[in-house]
Amino acid sequence: MISFRDNIVFLIAKAHQQAQGFLKGQLKTFGLTPVQCLLVESLWEEEGLSVGEIGRRLVLDTATLAGVLDRMVNAGWVRREVDSEDARVARVFLTEKAREATAELATTIGSTNNELLNKFSLEEKVLFKRFLRDIHNYD
């Protein structure tokens, strides 16, 4: 029988709790949740994504994403615009507030990642990320 201490589901869940809790604390000064931060990061890579594309990239269902987006629009982090070629599609853009916070937010995200992985060698960090992507089947 496997001990719960060696159960991979337990280990991943506890690592997730610790990482989310730590990130949550780091993001308090911005007034963002970890999911909202991921949404901002996705728009750093490519602005003007459709709501559907953001959902696919972040693996979020439409209902969850709609609530997250509503709160971010109300807080002034993003804006939604109707696609000029297809009125059924909403595109999401960063606001000036988000752009002004980019450097500080990126630094916070980087330091959070470094803090969480500081016990690992470079090779272990690369392998760890690969293993997590493989479990998730995410490129």
Image: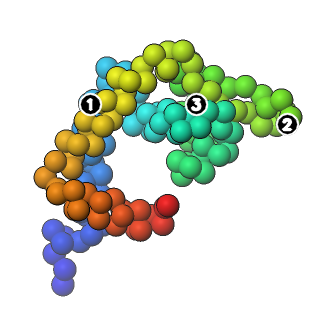
Disc 3 residue type (three-letter): Leu
Q: The N terminus lies in which quarter of the figure?
A: bottom left
Q: Read off the residue under disc 1.
A: 25
Circle 2 SS class:
loop
Residue 123 is situated, as x and y percent measured from the top left of the image, at: 23, 62
Q: Read off the residue under disc 3.
A: 69
Residue 46 is situated, as x and y percent measured from the top left of the image, at: 59, 37
The answer to whether mark 2 and mark 1 are in CB contact below 8 A is no
Disc 1 residue type (three-letter): Gly
Nearer to us of marks 2 and 1 is: 2
Residue 70 is situated, as x and y percent measured from the top left of the image, at: 59, 27
95 w.r.t. 15: above or below: above
Nearer to us of marks 2 and 3 is: 2
- Residue at screen point 23% across, 43% down: 114
Q: Read off the residue under disc 2.
A: 86
Residue nearer the viewer, 31 or 46? 46
Q: Quadrant of residue 127?
A: bottom left
Name the side, left or right, on which 42 lies relative to 127: right
The answer to whether mark 3 and mark 1 are in CB contact below 8 A is no
Disc 2 versus disc 3: distance between alpha carbons? 20 Å
- Residue at screen point 60% across, 43% down: 54
Disc 3 versus disc 1: distance between alpha carbons? 21 Å
125 w.r.t. 89: above or below: below
Circle 3 SS class:
helix
64 w.r.t. 132: above or below: above
